[in-house]
Image (spheres, grey):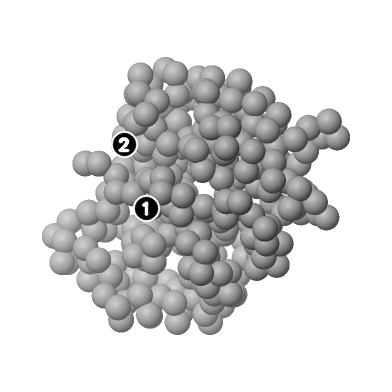
Amino acid sequence: MPISTLTLNDGNQVPWIAFGTGTALRDQDVQSPVESAIVNGFTHLDGAQMYNNEESLGMAIRACGTPRSALFITTKLNGLQPDQTAKTALQVSLKKLGLEYVDLYLVHAPGHHAGRLKEVWKMMEECKREGLAKSIGVSNFEVAHLQEILEGAEFPPSVNQVELHPYVWKSLQPVIALHKEHGIVTSSYGGLSPVFRVPGGPLDPVIEKIRERLESTRGQSVSVGQVLIKWLQQNGILVVTTSSKADRMREYLDTANVPELTAEEIESIENAGAQHYYKFLVLSN
């Protein structure tokens, strides 16, 4: 079943769910898990210079035999060395990946470029103009960071990838409002953190009740992870997730076939999340 897409503000299309090569896969040889992800249906692969595994990501892309046009590849700009630009850093990534272009190139963290975000964004725009990146965006940007680069930008960011789950949903509303104003797609990492990192929180009984309802409606198994991913999907979020297990990969993709949450269920998730602020992943600068 084809993966549905979201439309970016530059007109390009992005698959709504991606297989990420960070977190537990960071600094690892990712060829095997990425090949497994592609075999099991993922077409969007989310990498980064910081993850230190672009070479093995590229090996998986070449080994899978899937046409380049059928894949959507993301990478992210790390901190720049004194003699580097966003363009030359991307050219190094492209060589490692064995690609002529990436579909999406993100500034990984604003703290890497303090005092020069506008300058770095101009470099990102050059990558887009030259076709080295079809779309450009950012990651971990807050309102002030976005406002800094939006002023005078030729191309607004197409995506902002942030930690996003119900425990940070309320705090992210100013960022999400700015995204909507400029047509920026909100992308999430760490979306399943409430399930895997802090079980026992106020979300748990809410998620379980919804899971039981969805399973009954569907007539087959629904996981708590699928409930959270469905909540993200229905909020128009680009979901980045990962696993080394093939059955978990298939489960995440199968979320598209899970019945929709009701408006009341979505509200109950967000109300429960608002009771307990918890940010799990702090990106070091």
Type of amino acid under label 1 = Leu
Query: Which residue is at 31% across, 34% downward?
Result: 40
Percent of width and height locating residue 256: 27, 53
Say which residue label 2 marks: 41
Say which residue label 1 marks: 6
| Residue 5 relative to residue 158: left or right | left
Type of amino acid under label 2 = Gly
Q: Which mark is residue 29?
A: none
Label total for image: 2
CA–CA distance between discs 1 and 2? 17 Å
Residue 162 in view? yes
| Residue 128 relative to residue 72: left or right | right
- N-terminal of the pair, mark 1 or mark 2, is 1
| Residue 57 relative to residue 84: left or right | left
Query: Which residue is at 37% across, 29% downward?
Result: 69
Q: Residues within 10 Å of mark 2 (few under 14, many from 20)?
A: some
Percent of width and height locating residue 245: 40, 38
Image: 257 above or below 97? below
Percent of width and height locating residue 53: 60, 29
For numbered disc 2, what is the local secondary structure?
A: loop
Query: Which residue is at 37% across, 70% downward?
Result: 207
Image: 166 above or below 53? below
Q: Is mark 1 in CB contact (under 8 Å) with mark 2?
A: no
For numbered disc 1, what is the local secondary structure?
A: strand
